[in-house]
Amino acid sequence: MQIAVVGGGACSPEVRDIARRIGQIIASHGHVLICGGLGGVMEAACCGARDAGGLAVGILPGEREEANCCVDVGIATGMGHARNVIIVNSADLVIALPGELGTLSEMALAVKMKKPVISLSSWEICGAFQAKDPEEVEQLMEKIDSCQREPVQRDSGQEDLRQIGQEAQ
């Protein structure tokens, strides 16, 4: 899967550690991490993916030179916040960590595009799974991955995701 990690461009040391752990989890399962490519949550997640031998793709608001030091593939868009649509549309799953309105917009776009969203200490919005720690994010991620791998009818896949949400509560 391609998994987007969204969150603040600046964050606390505690959130930085959590984001790094999420990046490691994504990479350890063989998934590609996608993010906005800047600092804070995005940088920590990219560094975590790199620690675990994974690939981190940064969809940048401007030029490639803006990418954090752990982005493996930087994609310059020149689009500012409009790049959020590209980040979400490129992802099979969105994991949201603490952030501001940009994070909220990415979560809302994902729900609108019928992409699964896992929120870890981020915004609580209708349609997003709530996780309490990185281990729960990993469990949800594995269930979502398994639902997406199984050949299902388009509508039944959404039903499977609803079932995962009910099990997580």
Image (cartoon, rainbow, N blue to C red):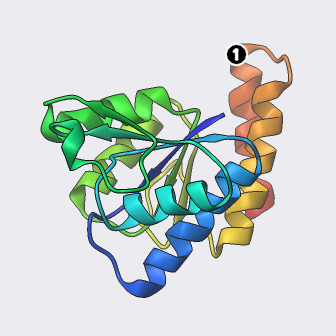
Q: Residue at x 57, y 55 (%)?
A: 50
Closer to the camera, 166 or 78? Answer: 78
In the image, residue 119 above or below residue 107:
below
Mark 1, residues whose alpha carbon is within 10 Å: few (<14), some, or many (≥20)? few
Quadrant in the picture for residue 23: bottom right
Residue in the picture at 66% in, 34% down = 1
Q: On the rendered structure, is 6 left or right of 143?
A: left
Q: Give coordinates of residue 161: x percent, y percent.
A: 71, 40
Q: Depth check: 163 or 64 in front?
A: 64
How many circles with numbers are drawn on the protein?
1
User: Which residue position holds label 1?
Assistant: 154
Residue occupying image coordinates x 55% and y 74%? 18
Residue 120, percent from left and from top: 54, 68
Q: Position of residue 96 (x, y in %)?
A: 47, 58
In this view of the protein, can residue 165 be seen by the observer? no
Q: Is residue 3 left or right of residue 41?
A: right
- Residues 41 and 46: in front is 46
x, y percent for residue 75: 32, 31
Give the amino acid at mark 1.
Arg
The vertical placement of 116 against 14, above or below, is: above
Query: In the image, is 38 to the left or to the right of 3?
Result: left
Q: Is residue 21 left or right of residue 168?
A: left
Q: Is residue 106 above or below residue 121?
A: above
